[in-house]
């Protein structure tokens, strides 16, 4: 099934702020969260919970 034009949900990639490894892919609602998303997630390269930020 094709996506509607102007869909609110988009796919984003999360990147570790310390080592810059791109670890997670997720989706977000563009209308509810217009700013870049930042979450604390586990980084396999750092082997610790680090802050991950949305990249474009």
Image: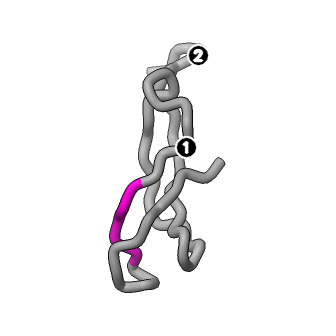
Q: Quadrant of the N terminus?
A: top left
The residue tagged with tag 2: helix, strand or loop?
loop
Residue at 52% x, 14% y is 4
Q: Is residue 29 left or right of residue 54?
A: left
Tell me if residue 54 is in the magenta stretch: no
Mark positioned earlier in the residue sequence (2 or 1): 2
* Structural distance between the alpha carbons of marks 2 and 1: 19 Å
The residue tagged with tag 1: helix, strand or loop?
loop
Colour approach in the figure:
one colour
Name the magenta segment's main secondary structure: strand
Residue at 54% x, 69% y is 17
Occupied quadrant, residue 18: bottom right
Residue at 40% x, 71% y is 50
Q: Nearer the viewer, mark 2 or mark 1?
A: 1
Image coords of residue 14 (percent x, y): 50, 57
Write down the region rendered in magenta.
39-43
In this picture, is 52 found above or below 37? below
Image coords of residue 29 (percent x, y): 44, 29
Image coords of residue 39 (percent x, y): 39, 55
Occupied quadrant, residue 36: top right
> Which residue has dot 2 on it?
6
Q: How many marks?
A: 2
> Which residue has dot 1 on it?
36
In this picture, is 40 found above or below 4? below
């Amino acid at each position: 099934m094709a996506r509607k034009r102007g869909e609110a949900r988009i796919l984003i990639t999360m990147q570790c702020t310390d080592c810059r490894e791109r670890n997670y892919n997720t989706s977000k609602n563009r209308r509810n969260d217009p700013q870049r998303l930042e979450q604390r997630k586990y980084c396999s390269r750092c082997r610790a919970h680090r802050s991950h930020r949305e990249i474009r």
